[in-house]
């Protein structure tokens, strides 16, 4: 079975696009790897990388894991690393933004219901963590 022939790539790209659009509705988020003007650029059908201002990515990784959503704060080949992604740094992100970035990867078996669930729990987790953040609250420094 080939993914192009059976429509898997197109289906995953549509799910990814829907996931991105929903997450990017959260204030203080952005798409890593988009054109300088935010325009679409070709990329892998099942993967997106999004930054979340005023958050440590690792805190969001843990919060989402507790809700059954697996994401990563680094590249697939360096999961578990504590340093920001060298790829994101090479793309011009500063350390704070790179550390606040998460990679979302959709499995071949991902469904609309899976995306619905992620779009429910991500905004909740972001809101909760930002409410706890001294940066977001303006009490740091």
Image (tube, grey):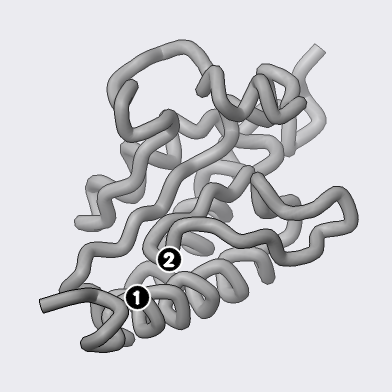
Residue at 56%, 38% (x, y): give it.
Answer: 101
Q: Residue at x 24, y 75 (%)?
A: 3
- Give the crowd class for mark 1: few <14, some 14-19, many >=20 residues within 10 Å: some
Rendering coords of residue 117 (x, y %): 33, 75
- Judging depth in this view, the residue of 119 and 44 nearest the camera is 44
Residue in view at x 74 percent, y 36 percent: 137
**43 shown above or below 91:** below
In the picture provided, is 47 more to the left or to the right than 69? right
* Towards the viewer: 131 or 42: 42
Residue 68 visible in the displayed image: yes
Q: Which is nearer the eye, 44 or 64?
A: 44
53 left or right of 19? right
Question: Foreground residue, 70 or 46?
Answer: 46
Q: Quadrant of residue 4?
A: bottom left
Q: Position of residue 85 (x, y in %)?
A: 51, 23
Q: Position of residue 44 (x, y in %)?
A: 45, 58
Label 2 SS = loop
Task: Judge whether 29 appears above or below 6 on screen.
Answer: above
| 85 left or right of 114 in image | right
Task: Give the image location of residue 70, x and y in percent.
Answer: 26, 49
Residue 51: numbered disc: none
Q: Are dots 1 and 2 in contact, CB under 8 Å?
A: yes
- What residue did someone put label 1 on? 9
- The residue beneath circle 2 is 45
Is residue 113 visible to the viewer in this orientation of the structure? Answer: no
């Amino acid at each position: 079975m080939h993914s192009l022939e059976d429509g898997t790539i197109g289906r995953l790209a549509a799910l990814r696009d829907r996931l991105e659009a929903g997450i990017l509705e959260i204030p203080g988020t952005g798409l890593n790897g988009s054109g300088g003007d935010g325009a679409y650029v070709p990329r892998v059908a099942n993967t997106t990388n999004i930054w979340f201002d005023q958050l440590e990515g690792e805190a969001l990784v843990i919060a989402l894991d507790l809700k059954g959503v697996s994401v990563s704060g680094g590249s697939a080949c360096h999961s578990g690393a504590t340093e920001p992604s060298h790829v994101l740094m090479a793309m011009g992100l500063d350390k704070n933004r790179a550390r606040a970035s998460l990679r979302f990867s959709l499995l071949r078996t991902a469904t609309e219901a899976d995306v619905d669930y992620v779009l429910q729990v991500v905004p909740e987790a972001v809101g909760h963590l930002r409410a706890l953040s001294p940066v977001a609250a303006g009490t740091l420094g």
